[in-house]
Image (tube, grey):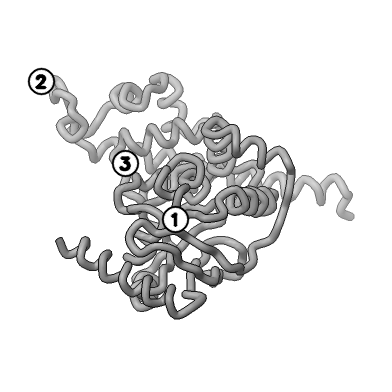
C-alpha cells in the first residue's frame, strides 16, 4: 500500500534526478567548449608548456571573473547555484553563439536577461510579412516590450531605430531615455501609464525571472517619472487603440494599433500601426520612401 509520504517523495526524487542530469550536461558542455577554444581566440599567449590546444580551467575563470575552485566545481557537476551574471560572463568568455548561449542558460535552469538579437519567434516568414506590410509600420515585440524585429517604416516612425543599440530597443526604455522617441509620441504621459500598467499585469506571471527583474530595476533607476507611474499599481490588458505620432520627416500621423499574437500565450506579438485616414496613409508612404532611400544609400 502506497503512503502519502511515498507519493510526495516520487516527484521530489524525479526533480532531483532531472537537476542532476542538467548539472552533468552543463559540465560536459562547458568542458567541450573550453577544450575547443584556443588561447589566441581570447587574446591569451599560448606558452611553451601547454599540453592541450584548448583553454585551462583557470583561464576560463580569469576571463569570467570567477574563482577557479568555483568554476572547477561547475565542471564537476557539483550542486552549486549559478547566477545569470556568471552565466553571461561564461557565455562571453567561451565565445558562445546565440544558440549555444541559449543552451547554456537552459541547462542551468535560468532565463537569459539579455534580449536576443536573434529571436526564435522571428522566422524568415515573419520578416517577410513585416516587409510586405510596408508602408504600414510594423514590428515584433515580446511581452517585455523588447523590439525584436521591425520593417523600414517602423524603423523611422518614432526615432532612427537602426542607431539604437539592440539592448536599448525596448519601448519603455526609449520612452524615458530617447529624446526623439519621446517627442514623437503626442500623448506621452498616457502612453507611459498604459505601458507600465500592461507591464505590471504581464509581469505577474514572470516575477522570479531575472530578465523581468533587471528591466524593472533599470527603469526605476532611469526615471522618477517611471517610478511615479509604477507605484500607482495600475493593471490593464493589451488592447488595440488609436495612436497619434509627430514624425520628424512627414509630420503628424494617426494610426490604429493592432496586436497579432505569434503563439497561444501572451508572448511575442506583431504590432501593426494601420493608417487611420487617407492623409496618414500618404504620409506613411512618403516615410517608407525615405526609409528605402536611406537603406540603399
Q: CA distance from mark 2 to mark 3?
A: 23 Å
Give the number of the disc on residue 147.
1
Image location of residue 31, percent across then percent down: 34, 37
Residue 45 vs 87, above or below: the answer is above
Please indicate whether residue 43 sits to the left or right of residue 21 in the image: left
Residue at 30% from the left image edge and 37% from the top image edge: 94
Q: Which of pointers 1 and 3 lies earlier in the amino acid sequence?
A: 3
Asked which secondary structure carries label 3, the reply is helix
Q: Which mark is residue 242?
A: none
Q: Nearer the viewer, residue 273 or 55?
A: 273
Q: Are marks 2 and 3 in contact (CB under 8 Å)?
A: no
Observer able to see residue 90: yes
Q: Which residue is the extreme one toward the left?
A: 48
Residue on which disc 2 sits: 48
**Residue 207, position as x, y percentages in the image:** 66, 43
- Which quadrant of the structure image shows residue 259? bottom right
Q: How far is disc 2 from disc 1 in space, using C-alphas? A: 48 Å
Q: Nearer the viewer, mark 1 or mark 3?
A: 1
Count residues near mark 3 (Cα–Cα under 10 Å), then give few for <14, some for 14-19, many for 20+.
Answer: few
Q: Secondary structure at mark 1?
A: strand
What x and y, as percent, mark residue 220?
58, 34
User: Does residue 125 show up?
Assistant: no
Q: Are marks 2 and 1 in contact (CB under 8 Å)?
A: no
What numbered label is drawn on residue 32? Answer: 3
Between 151 and 105, the one nearer to me in the picture? 151
Quadrant of image for the C terminus: bottom left
Q: Residues within 10 Å of mark 2 (few under 14, many from 20)?
A: few
Left or right of 69 in this view: 39: left
Location of the N terminus (image quadrant): bottom right
**Where 277 sits versus 81, above or below?**
below
Amino acid at each position: 500500500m502506497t503512503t502519502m509520504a511515498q507519493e510526495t517523495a516520487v516527484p521530489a526524487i524525479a526533480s532531483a534526478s532531472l537537476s542532476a542530469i542538467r548539472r552533468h550536461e552543463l559540465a560536459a558542455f562547458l568542458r567541450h567548449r573550453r577544450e575547443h577554444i584556443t588561447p589566441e581566440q581570447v587574446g591569451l599567449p599560448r606558452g611553451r608548456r601547454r599540453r592541450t590546444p584548448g583553454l585551462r580551467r583557470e583561464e576560463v575563470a580569469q576571463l569570467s571573473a570567477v574563482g577557479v575552485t568555483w568554476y572547477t566545481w561547475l565542471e564537476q557537476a557539483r550542486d552549486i547555484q549559478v547566477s545569470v551574471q556568471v552565466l553571461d560572463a561564461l557565455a562571453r568568455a567561451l565565445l558562445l553563439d546565440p544558440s549555444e548561449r541559449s543552451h547554456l542558460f537552459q541547462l542551468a535552469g535560468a532565463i537569459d536577461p539579455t534580449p536576443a538579437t536573434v529571436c526564435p519567434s522571428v522566422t524568415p516568414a515573419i520578416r517577410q510579412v513585416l516587409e510586405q506590410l510596408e508602408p504600414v509600420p510594423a514590428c515584433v515585440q515580446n511581452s517585455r516590450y523588447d523590439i525584436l524585429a521591425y520593417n523600414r517604416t517602423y524603423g523611422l516612425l518614432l526615432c532612427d531605430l537602426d542607431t539604437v543599440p539592440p539592448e536599448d530597443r525596448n519601448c519603455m526604455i526609449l520612452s524615458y531615455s530617447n529624446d526623439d522617441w519621446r517627442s514623437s509620441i503626442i500623448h506621452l504621459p498616457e502612453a507611459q501609464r498604459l505601458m507600465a500598467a500592461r507591464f505590471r499585469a504581464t509581469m505577474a506571471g514572470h516575477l522570479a525571472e531575472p530578465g523581468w527583474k533587471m528591466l524593472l530595476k533599470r527603469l526605476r533607476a532611469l526615471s522618477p517619472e517611471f517610478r511615479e507611474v509604477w507605484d500607482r499599481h495600475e493593471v490593464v490588458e493589451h488592447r488595440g487603440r488609436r495612436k497619434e505620432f509627430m514624425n520628424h520627416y512627414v509630420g503628424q500621423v494617426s494610426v490604429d494599433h493592432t496586436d497579432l499574437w505569434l503563439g497561444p500565450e501572451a508572448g511575442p506579438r506583431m504590432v501593426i500601426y494601420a493608417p487611420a485616414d487617407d492623409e496618414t496613409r500618404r504620409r506613411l508612404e512618403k516615410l517608407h520612401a525615405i526609409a528605402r532611400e536611406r537603406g540603399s544609400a
